[in-house]
Amino acid sequence: MLAATTRRSVLLGSAAAALAGPRAFAAALNPALPAGLREEAVIESPAGKRDLLKLTWRPPNYETPLDGFTTPITANDRFFVRYHLANIPTKAELANWSLSIGGDAAEQEVKLSLADLKALPATEITAICQCAGNRRGLFTPHVPGVEWGIGAMGNAVWRGVRLKDVLAKAGVKPGAVEVTVRGADSAVVEATPIFKKSIPLDRAMDDTVLLAYAMNGEDLPLLNGYPVRLIVPGWTGTYWMKHVTRIEVVSKPFDGFWMAKGYRVPKGVFGTDRPFTSQDNEKTSPVTELVVNSLITAPLDGAKVGGAGFAVQGLAWDGGHGIARVEVSLDAGATWQAATLGEDLGRFAFRPWSFAVPAGSGSITVLARATATNGATQPAKLVANPAGYHHNVISTVTVAAG
Ligand SMILES: Nc1nc2c(c(=O)[nH]1)N[C@H]1C(S)=C(S)[C@@H](COP(=O)(O)O)O[C@H]1N2
Ligand SMILES: [Mo]
């Protein structure tokens, strides 16, 4: 019970304080987040961004505060930023950007400019980019890594070309197993493993997987992958490579650090529709699909509300089945009532929802639980795992009514 209370107060306390300013935010973090983070986390506006919570600067890791989630589409300037390596290319360095495609399971080497890419048939998809480690900072006991609160996620309309159309230019040989992607960022120290990822060939050929050059109708912000990033709707952000410069079609599973060692979960603990079997080992699997989840965006935890009733608002999402329902409980989970779902922006997008709490007074705790169309629902108890991924415990806020 103590742990649950602590998590709740940090989750929504941080959001409430984010609106009140950096100092209040840092103070609100004190109870449960690690010491290093408490000193670092302040509201900042890095280039092209506005009012994000800075968790680390080198590499840049910034999360979106709760007030960035009042609409189902996340604004470009409020969209979170996650990097593993500190050398981020500048716009000037990317002016002559090109993308090369090859690999041992490609028929030929191909080089494409941004103009070449934009000349291919364009398509759009609304999808959530969420870090697997979103809410890691709310794990008890603590797990090492970037101690994210609730905001290592965002939902945008991405425009670009299908990865499969680009792969077709190089030609895919019969023995192909995976497609690797790497970006233009690099490490300060050479010994640091480069950030390079792979996805299974069948996923790479999926109609939903794009090389995107626009986000919500504009060029990608530099910190979200300008000029081109990979979009893997339904899968965790780790595969959404930014500033993509090199793609390879390969005949063997890619064994780089960020596949073989990082971004892995205990085998069989989280369900998956499309297992990434070429990367499985005896004990662990790569983290893939997003788990079903929800966020209460209003009212803020600890808020005072009138006695005449109030509206609860939030977002719900999953890895691409779509949201079947969101339910709210006002009696600690004994009974649940249906919330009203808002606009459907597609199965990979945030689904807004709302619920009218009737007149009452005193302390009211609201629990929210989303269920996807495949029946998956949010757990009451955290699913522990060593890297702190997939935090999707039922969220709560407590308000004072009357
Ligand atoms: N080039 C590059 N791409 C990257 C990363 C990175 O460190 N470098 N991090 C990945 C991870 S783990 C996440 S969660 C998403 C975050 O996307 P964003 O920074 O646009 O929010 O980018 C992915 N793509
Ligand atoms: Mo991530």
Image: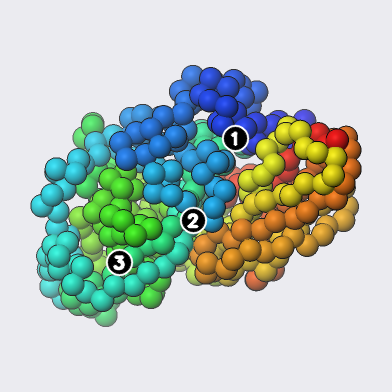
What crowding class fits label 2: few (fewer than 14 Cα within 10 Å), some (14-19), or many (20 or more)? Answer: many
Q: Picture quarter containing residue 119? A: bottom left
Helix, strand or loop at label 1? It is helix
Please name the residue that numbered disc 3 is placed on: 160
Secondary structure, mark 3, is strand
* Nearer to us in this view, 204 or 191: 204
Relative to residue 240, is residue 26 depicted above or below?
above
Image coordinates for residue 84, horizontal then vertical, percent: 35, 40
Looking at numbered disc 1 in the image, what kind of residue is underneath it? Ala
Q: CA distance from mark 3 to mark 2?
A: 18 Å
- Residue drawn at the location 33% of the way across and 65% of the way down: 159
List x then y, in percent, for residue 241.
32, 54
Which amino acid type corresponds to the residue marked 2 in the rendered image? Answer: Ile
Pointer 3 and pointer 2: residues touching (CB < 8 Å)?
A: no
Q: Of 352 and 139, which appears nearest the observer?
A: 352
Label 2 sits on residue: 73
- The first of marks 3 and 2 along the sequence is 2
* Quadrant in which residue 158 is drawn: bottom left
Amino acid type at image mark 3: Gly
Q: Nearest the camera: 396 or 363?
A: 363
* Res 15 label: 1
Comparing 396 with 195, the one in front is 396
Observer able to see residue 332: no
Disc nearer the start of the sequence (2/1)? 1
Q: How many marks?
A: 3
Q: Which residue does the image show at 48% across and 26% down from the upper left?
A: 41
Ranked by sequence position, the earlier of labels 3 and 1 is: 1
Mark carried by residue 379: none
- Dot 1: within a 10 Å radius of its alpha carbon, few (fewer than 14), some, or many (20 or more) residues? many
- Lateral position of residue 337 relative to residue 113, left or right: right
Residue 313 can be seen in this image: yes
Q: Is residue 278 left or right of residue 121?
A: right
